Amino acid sequence: MKLFTIGFTQKNAKQFFELLKANQIELLIDVRLNNKSQLAGFTKGNDLEYLLAEICDCKYKHCLEYAPTKEILDGYKKGDITWEKYVELYSALMIKRGDYKNFYEKYESYSNICLLCSEPTAAQCHRRLAAEMIAKDNPNISIKHI
């Protein structure tokens, strides 16, 4: 299984959907806390589900179990916590939830899955942290950020 990650910020719809098509994404897992924001543009939940099916023949799933809490996210966005503290808090949250442990078994029928968030790159985004936790103990999963 290949586990991709993508952010929609600084991409137009054509760039976004072409990247998904080029990488043959079969399932896009939305790991954003809020997928209905006006700032989400073409990636608003119900719109995105429709567009993925029509343009990419891709399924869509919004999974809050991989999203940070509002408190963690707000703390980082407001500058109250550093990136290092965000990583610590998010990682602890993921361990507590435990959902990353059965990711492969849950989605093994897919070859190419993509985690979606808003950040333009994966460097300082929880989608990278989630992908790394998912793949850490599973040699059947490789990660690619697009």
Image: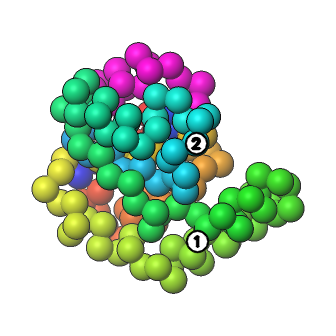
- The local secondary structure at tag 1 comes to helix
Which residue lies under the disc numbered 2? 37
Q: Position of residue 74 (x, y in %)?
A: 74, 59
Q: Is residue 75 above or below residue 59?
A: below
Look at 34% across and 21% down and name the residue there. 18
Q: Is residue 146 above or below residue 96?
A: above
Look at 38% across and 74% down and name the residue there. 99
The answer to which quarter of the image holds residue 13 is top left
The numbered mark at residue 104 is none
Q: Amino acid at mark 1?
A: Ser
Which residue lies under the disc numbered 1? 91
The residues tagged by marks 1 and 2 sit, at their Cα atoms, a distance apart of 25 Å
Quick check: can you spot residue 3? no
Camera-nearest label, 1 or 2: 2
Rendered-image quadrant of the C terminus: top left
The answer to which quarter of the image holds residue 82 is bottom right
Mark 2 Cα-neighbour bin, 10 Å: few <14, some 14–19, many ≥20:
few
Q: Position of residue 66 (x, y in %)?
A: 47, 63
Mark 1 Cα-neighbour bin, 10 Å: few <14, some 14–19, many ≥20:
some
Magenta segment's dominant SS is helix
- The local secondary structure at tag 2 comes to loop
Q: What segment carries the magenta color?
A: 9-22
Look at 58% across and 42% down and name the residue there. 37
Q: Is residue 119 above or below residue 63?
A: above
Most extreme residue toward the bottom is 96
Task: Look at the image and say whether residue 50 sits in the magenta stretch.
Answer: no
Quick check: can you spot residue 89? yes
Q: Earlier in the sequence, mark 1 or mark 2?
A: 2
Q: Is residue 10 left or right of residue 74?
A: left
Q: Position of residue 20 (x, y in %)?
A: 33, 30
Look at 37% across and 41% down and name the residue there. 46
Q: Amino acid at mark 2?
A: Ser
